[in-house]
Image (cartoon, rainbow, N blue to C red):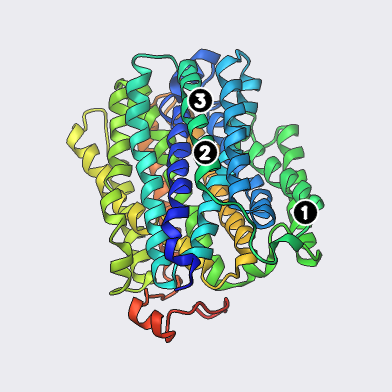
Amino acid sequence: MTASSKHYWRGFLPLLISNVLITLLSMITSVGTPYITDSFGLTSQQAPWITTLTSMSSAILAPLLGWLGDKRGVKTQFLVGIAFTFIANILCAVTHSFVVFCAGRFLSGIGLAASYPACMSYIADNFPTEKKVGGFSILGACITLGSGLGPTIIGLFLSVFTWRQLFWYSQILVIGMLVYVLLAVKGGAPEGGQARKLDGVGMTMLFLGIGALISLLSLSTQLGWGHPLILALLAVSAVFLPLFFRHEARTAHPMLDAALLKSRRFLIPALTGLYIYGIKCYYSTALPYYFTSGLGMSSATSGFMLTILFLAAFPLSFFVNRLNRRFTTRTLAMCGATTWVLGMLMLVIVTETTPLWYYVLAMILPSLGIALLGGMPNACALKGVPPEKSGAASGAISLLSNLGACLISALVVPYLSVFGAAPDGTPDYVAAFPQVAWIMVLLLAVCFILTIFFPRDKAVSPQLDSQGESGRDTPCKSRC
């Protein structure tokens, strides 16, 4: 264990706490989506923009913030994210224009694009080898804690305050985070990171390619696939995404290192993270509509149901590293994906008369999957990545994860307004929810197949690591 790793928790704690708070604040537009759409006179077909723009921003800008972390250090990376979160909350609180509100949600994604990759980079660079899987699992557990407490807290506050007031009051937490990170986190960039240059051309291509892709998916359910705007966005995406990957493979300082995507060791866990984030987005976005607008539950009850989903995973997450000493990461990943499939199958058969205890059970079961897959894929993907590239690698993982959330929010959630709708177009969320759940079952089946090819890692023992026999990270190889 190096000298810097002896106190790895001391430097990690403020980053971890701030990340939890940023995740918790993002729940305002999860439980509050039905109220926000009512304020602007929108339907659930237009509602995904509220969450999609945040995920889109997180995906597109994650490599840029990863570059900033490699260049200036995680402290600067985190502070930039907090600053943009502060600006975004002001815009959302004061505006009566949905366009300006969407701009605020886009800016809020910068906070997520900075915070989660910064924590991943810190674990990869500073945690001892035998503690990294546990560190990522605890990170996932704490993010899950923020996701779990968020719906209940936000739901309770929405029964007293308006969503605009919540954006104002949240600034107290944002300012507290800013001061905490300034005082508690040390600055400094990794060795070798200073040499990285900003790939502006790649950044522009990525922005146009992914932005067009997510936009066309969000608008397709409203305008139809044959609309000229949809075809134009499809053309932009089809041109700039291939150009981006071609450019990244040739440039000396890529925003997204193409070599990472060629490594099975990196790609399989990163793609698993894409699926997991997408499914979590479905739960946090679709369930509030189903419970609040479909079944007529209060925001507090709706938030409580989401809390069960995320909070039940919290205790188990602390045992993942111990489980990893007995079972391989592949075995744990397959078990986690199985619980996701079973939990979603339970939602396929729900009706208007389904008792509340059944929903509670349907929330607890997939929470096991959240615990097992909340952080482990990131640990596997980052294993062997050198410190000067950990920011770029973390940015790539965050890009793929948030892309999964974007795709689900933009493409799947709008079908809640399409399936089972009345002849006059009035949505029937109760009838549509089980049908949309079938789509998610198919996606989860693909995710399960992906975990079959997961790396077969096991956590090394501290004793072996101290002797230098098996605790040393090895470079990425194609064999898993």
Q: Secondary structure at mark 1?
A: loop
**Viewer can see residue 417:** yes
Residue 423 visible to the viewer: no
Question: Badges 3 and 2: C-beta atoms under 8 Å apart?
Answer: no
* Mark 2 burial class by Cα count in 10 Å: few <14, some 14-19, many 20+: many
Which residue type does callout 2 highlight?
A: Ser
Quadrant of the image occupied by residue 147? top left
Q: Position of residue 475 (x, y in %)?
A: 57, 78
Write down the residue under mark 2. 409
Q: Which residue is mark 1?
A: 198
Which picture quadrant has residue 23?
A: top left
Could you say where residue 204 lies in the image, as x and y percent from the top left? 78, 46
Q: Mark 2 and mark 1: span between their CA atoms?
A: 30 Å
Q: Residues within 10 Å of mark 1 (few under 14, many from 20)?
A: some
Among the two numbered marks 2 and 1 on one chain, the one whose residue lies closer to the N terminus? 1
Relative to 431, 196 lies left or right: right
Work out which quarter of the rendered image holds the N terminus and state it: bottom left
The amino acid marked with disc number 1 is Leu
Binning the other alpha carbons within 10 Å of mark 3 as few (below 14), some (14 to 19) or many (20 upward) gives some
- Picture layout, residue 451 above or below residue 225: below
Precedes in sequence: disc 3 or disc 2: 3
Q: Which residue is mark 3?
A: 171
The residue drawn where x is 21% and y is 28% is 353
| SS at badge 2 | helix
Q: Find residue 97 and report its horizontal and vertical position in percent.
A: 63, 15
In which quadrant of the rendered view does residue 258 lie? bottom right
Of labels 1 and 3, the one closer to you: 3
**Could you tell me which residue is drawn at 32 percent across and 62 percent down?**
320
